């Protein structure tokens, strides 16, 4: 039997779809995407510049939802905020902060770049922006 989404999940999904997101559109799915991305970065992100930008946007989606007044009334938002904070605490130490100074400091996840990357991303960031990051050849675990 398929369980209908909770009122929070329905409201969250409607909100993110209104922002143009049509996959991974529940709170749990967006949080999982952010958490999985951070786990990849902990090992040294091996995707390319485009994939990195796409994945980090899951945090932007979460931020927009956490600031949305219509979602603030749901008790599930408090749980989501705590879980996001836990993942953020893992991600912040992985960043070279303030790499993109033109991005608002409140969007710290976009303003910094990961310290550890695979060859391709490290090369792309060097070519595109002049950034040097540590190239990982194997898992950092």
Image: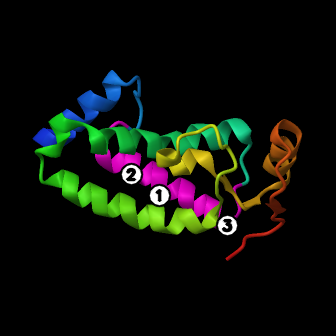
How packed mark 2 is, by other alpha carbons closer than 10 Å (few <14, some 14-19, many 20 or more), is: many
Q: Residue at x 51, y 56 (%)?
A: 36
Tell me where residue 52 sits by quadrant: top right
- In this rendering, does residue 26 appear at all? no
User: For the residue labelled by badge 3, is the local secondary structure a helix, a strand or a loop?
Assistant: helix
Q: Residue at x 81, y 40 (%)?
A: 129
Q: Are marks 1 and 2 in contact (CB under 8 Å)?
A: yes
Which residue is tagged 2?
Answer: 31
Which residue is tagged 3?
Answer: 43
| Mark sitting on residue 131 | none
Tell me where residue 61 sits by quadrant: top left
| Cα separation between marks 1 and 2 | 6 Å
User: For the residue labelled by badge 1, is the local secondary structure a helix, a strand or a loop?
Assistant: helix
Indicate whether residue 36 is drawn in magenta.
yes
For the record, the magenta segment spans 25-45
Q: Is residue 80 above or below residue 71?
A: below
Q: Are marks 2 and 3 in contact (CB under 8 Å)?
A: no
Task: Using residue 17 as the reference point, say whether residue 51 is left or right of it.
Answer: right
How packed mark 3 is, by other alpha carbons closer than 10 Å (few <14, some 14-19, many 20 or more), is: some
How packed mark 1 is, by other alpha carbons closer than 10 Å (few <14, some 14-19, many 20 or more), is: many
Sooner in the amino-acid sequence: mark 1 or mark 3? 1
Quarter that holds the N terminus: top left
Indicate whether residue 29 is drawn in magenta.
yes
Which residue is tagged 1?
Answer: 35
Compare residues 87 and 22 and report the one nearer the observer: 87
């Amino acid at each position: 039997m398929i369980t209908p989404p909770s009122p929070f999940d329905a409201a969250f999904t409607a909100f993110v779809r209104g922002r143009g997101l049509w996959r991974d559109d529940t709170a749990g799915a967006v949080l999982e995407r952010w958490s999985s991305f951070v786990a990849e970065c902990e090992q040294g992100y091996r995707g390319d510049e485009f994939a990195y930008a796409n994945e980090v946007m899951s945090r932007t989606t979460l931020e927009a939802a956490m600031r949305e007044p219509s979602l603030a009334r749901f008790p599930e938002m408090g749980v989501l905020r705590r879980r996001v904070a836990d993942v953020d605490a893992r991600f912040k130490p992985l960043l070279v902060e303030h790499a993109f100074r033109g991005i608002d400091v409140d969007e710290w996840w976009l303003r910094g770049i990961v310290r550890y990357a695979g060859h391709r991303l490290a090369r792309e960031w060097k070519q595109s922006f002049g950034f040097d990051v540590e190239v990982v050849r194997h898992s950092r675990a």
